[in-house]
Image (cartoon, coloured by chain):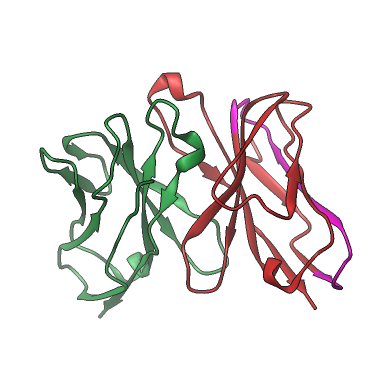
């Protein structure tokens, strides 16, 4: 069963780039890595998804090394509104829908 | 589209009572999920469904039951509520896995307290 590990918290300042790393040593061959953002009293919201190498969309980048045992979410030029909890999710490989594992979340505090 | 809707938003149960948490999605998604989130923790998968009539257990299924009679609805049943089931419950849905698109759409959650 895949286990994901993330830092509990991070601080940053407006305009900086933030990188949050998730460790997933037991990731299965067909597992995907997905990142979600959650604000208080709301459900998580999808940020980005990847399988290997690098993926970029309009809000973030996701870096996955060749061994896929970790992944790094990169948020460029954060603002105060990016203060939230960020979760990595590993799973979906072949028969792994029932083994979706969320990390414990990283609380990002963006300061002015 | 309303997306994923959940009812009720809040509920207080006494130990031993039962209740059903409702979840509906209007995006014609095949996959639906139930998670629980304890304070300061990540989400844990309770049950999921890959289509109408098909359900399976996730990481923490004990004390819960589900059914999926239609594509839109995925109710979660709590039998004999216990204090350990105090949590926030999230329902989510996503497209079929075959599309290589695993984005889950989450509902607003149901905050349940068992006393």
**A85 sits to left or right of A17:** right
Highlighted range, magenta: B12-31
Q: Residue at left 53%, top 42%?
A: B105
> In the orientation shown, which residue stands out farthest toward the top?
B98
Q: Residue at x 10, y 38 (%)?
A: A66
Q: Picture quarter containing residue A22?
A: bottom left
Q: Total marks drawn?
A: 0
- The spot of residue B81 in percent (x, y) is 80, 64
The residue nearer to you, when weighing A62 against A105, is A105
Q: Colour of chain B?
A: red
Compared across the picture, whether B39 is left or right of A1 comes to right
Q: Quadrant of residue B19?
A: bottom right
Taking the magenta stretch, the answer to whether it contains residue B16 is yes
Q: Is residue A70 left or right of residue B1?
A: left
Residue B105 within the segment the image draws in magenta: no
Q: Which chain is green?
A: A
Rendered position, B67 above or below B60: above
Q: Residue at x 17, y 68 (%)?
A: A15
Rendered location of residue B66, percent (x, y): 74, 41
**Where does residue B36 sit, x and y in percent of width and height?**
60, 58
Residue A72 appears at what percent x and percent y? 19, 53
């Amino acid at each position: 069963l895949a286990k994901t590990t993330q830092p509990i918290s991070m601080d940053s300042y407006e305009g900086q780039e933030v990188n949050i790393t998730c460790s997933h040593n037991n990731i299965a061959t067909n597992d995907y890595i997905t990142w979600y953002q959650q604000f208080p009293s709301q459900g998580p919201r999808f940020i980005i998804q990847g399988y290997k190498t690098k993926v970029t969309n309009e809000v973030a980048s996701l870096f996955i090394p060749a061994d896929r045992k970790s992944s790094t979410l990169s948020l460029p030029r954060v603002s105060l509104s990016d203060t939230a909890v960020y979760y990595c999710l590993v799973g979906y490989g072949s028969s792994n829908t029932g083994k979706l594992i969320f990390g414990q979340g990283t609380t990002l505090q963006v300061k002015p | 589209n309303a997306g994923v809707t959940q009812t009720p938003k809040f509920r207080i149960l006494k130990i031993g009572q039962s209740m059903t948490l409702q979840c509906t999605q209007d995006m014609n998604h095949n996959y639906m999920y139930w998670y629980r989130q304890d304070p300061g923790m990540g989400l844990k998968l309770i049950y999921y469904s890959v289509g109408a009539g098909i359900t399976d257990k996730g990481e923490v299924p004990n004390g819960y039951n589900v059914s999926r009679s239609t594509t839109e609805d995925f109710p979660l049943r709590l039998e004999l509520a216990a204090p350990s089931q105090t949590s926030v419950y999230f329902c989510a849905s996503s497209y079929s896995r075959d599309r290589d698109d695993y984005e889950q759409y989450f509902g607003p959650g149901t905050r349940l307290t068992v006393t």
